[in-house]
Structures are given as structure tokens and as C-alpha cells.
Amino acid sequence: MSYYIGDIEFKSQLLNASGPKSITHRQLLKLNNTYGLGGIVTKSFTLDYKIGNPSPNYYYNHKTETSINSIGLTNNGAKYYFDFININSYQLTKPLFLSIAEQNHNNLNTIFNEYLKNKVYNIDMLIEYNVSCPNINNTNTSTSNEKIMVGYDIGELRTRLQYIKSLFSNPEYKYIPFGIKLPPYLDRYQLQNVANVINEFSDIIRFITVCNTMGNGCMLDEITCGSKISTTIGGIGGTSLKPIALGNVKLLSGYLKYDIQIIGCGGVKDVRDVYDFMFAGATFVQIGTKLFENPDSSIITKLYKDLISE
Ligand code: DHB
């Protein structure tokens, strides 16, 4: 069975979520070699390398199967991820999503100029533009320059998409199937507004990923009552996020007016979860927290085998 985004074919609807095991070339190659994974999503990257937040910046509660993270956008910079494609294109067997989290217009322009202008890559590639990283402004030291996340700022989201549309309308940049990764929304009015913006950009947005972690969570240690992570506050993922993600997929799929693929993300661990997201309106799913917790990525292969044997 095949699944499509634009004319890109996927052999499985299972994808990794950006973040877990997707930072280094080695990790990305391992994802490429994971049987049952339909496509690879890179760690969200910026133009320049970012070291991220001090450890511990991730914690998993086994009882609730829920995670908190404030990795802090650790990534090796745009060049490293385009180098990955150039070096490995002959052995990449799955479509690759470049998860771009660059929020600065000039830097975004540089990424397009340096790596997409008049360039041809020999693999199927897509862009997942991340407008929902909750961990940019929440280090203990950040103060005055805090800004609302783009995914929660409808005006800024529209401006950003307009800018990206203008880049793609330049014939020097070949169009690459493009989508956005959204934050979880708790208010229907916001969901309708974001769907309206996506409808306005139906010419460039081929998919949406619903959703990122729920920002500004906190988990405390049972004994010390101190925070489980160094930044105190972080994004919540895993089982606790699933009903919210599912509701967001369900509502958005009703509000969207054109043929767009939805990638469900939030607490996927078994066949039931995949079906739930499909019933809500998703075609693909991403696996985040469970992949973090699974050293050899065997969860993906097992889930794929379970799905095809149903
Ligand atoms: C990080 C977390 C996210 O949820 C995201 O979308 C991007 C980056 C991080 O902390 O590294």
C-alpha cells in the first residue's frame, strides 16, 4: 500500500517525529534503515548550529507514558542536514522531511538561497516548517525578548507563509512539498483561524503535522520536589497529549477546505492509536516519545508489522 503527499510516494504511513534520534547523520541513516518507517524527519534545524539547553532536558514518566522536554533546539545547522542528503543520496530509500525551525526572516532567506537556489537533490524531499517549538524562550535566563510562538500568532503565521510563498514563486527555487507543524490548540476559535490561514495558502501547503508538544508543562520529582528538567518548564508529549492531538486533527480536518494530508502526532504507540488518528482524519502518524524511549527503533518495525497483519 502506498500513501502520497503531492506526488511523493510513501510505502508506510509511519514517520518519526522530529527530535528523537534525528540529530546526527548516523541517527538519520539508522532511521533510513528502519524497516516499516515510511519517511525520515530531521531534527528541527536553524541556519546556525545550536547547542541547546543543559541536561537534564528530557524526562519520561513510565507510569503515565508521558514525556517532558526542553532540548533547546540542539541541532547541527542547515549545512549539516543538506550535507547529509548530498553525502547519502545514493543510499537513502525513503522520502526525507527537512524540519526547519528557523524563525528569523533573513536566516530563512539564507537557507533558501544557499541550499535551494538552482540546486537539484536526487532524493524525494519535503519541508516541514516548524512554527511550534515551545522551547525557544523558556531558558531560565531569557527575559525581555520573549515573543508569542508563531503558531499561536495568526497574523505572524500569515506573514511567514506569505514570505515563504514569495520564495517559492521565484523560479530559482524548485517547489518542494511544504507543510507546517502546528502547536496544540485549546480553543476552537484559534483552530478555525489557523484553518482559515491554511486554506488561504492551499497553493503551497501540502500537509500539516498535528501536533507538537504542549508547551509550558512542568514535572516535579516525588522526593526532592525539584523539576525533572534543568529549565523547569518544557513541552509535554506522549500518552497525555494524545486526546488533545486527536481533537485537533478531528476539528482541523473538518475546517480544511481542500485536499491536504494530515500527519497526526501525539502519544502514538500501538495500532489502536494509528487507527484513532486515521478515524480523526490523518493519513500519516509520527512517533516521538515512544521512539525516544526505544533504543533500537524496533517499535516502528513492530507497529508496521502489526498494521499490515490486521
Ligand atoms: C525542540 C522542541 C520542540 O518541540 C520543537 O518543535 C523543536 C525543538 C527542542 O527543544 O529542541
Image (tube, rainbow, N blue to C red):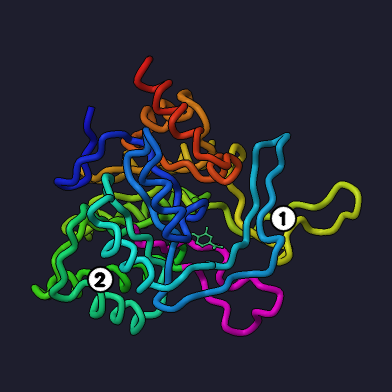
**Circle 1: residue type:** Cys
Which of the 4 image quadrants contains residue 216?
bottom right
Q: Which residues are magenta?
A: 128-149
| Of the image marks 1 and 2, the number of the one nearer the N terminus | 2
CB under 8 Å between discs 1 and 2: no
Residue 151 % position (x, y):
43, 62
Tag 2 secondary structure = helix
Q: Quadrant of the N terminus?
A: top left
Label 1 packing within 10 angstroms: few (<14), some (14-19), many (20+): some
Q: Residue furthest right?
A: 223
Tag 1 secondary structure = loop
Residue position for label 2: 164
Instruction: Relative to 278, say whether 194 is above or below.
Output: below
Q: Residue furthest top?
A: 310
Task: Count every numbered label the image shows and give the total.
Answer: 2
C-alpha span from label 1 to label 2: 34 Å
Residue position for label 1: 218
Q: Is residue 272 magenta?
A: no
**Circle 2: residue type:** Ile
Nearer the observer, 35 or 285: 35
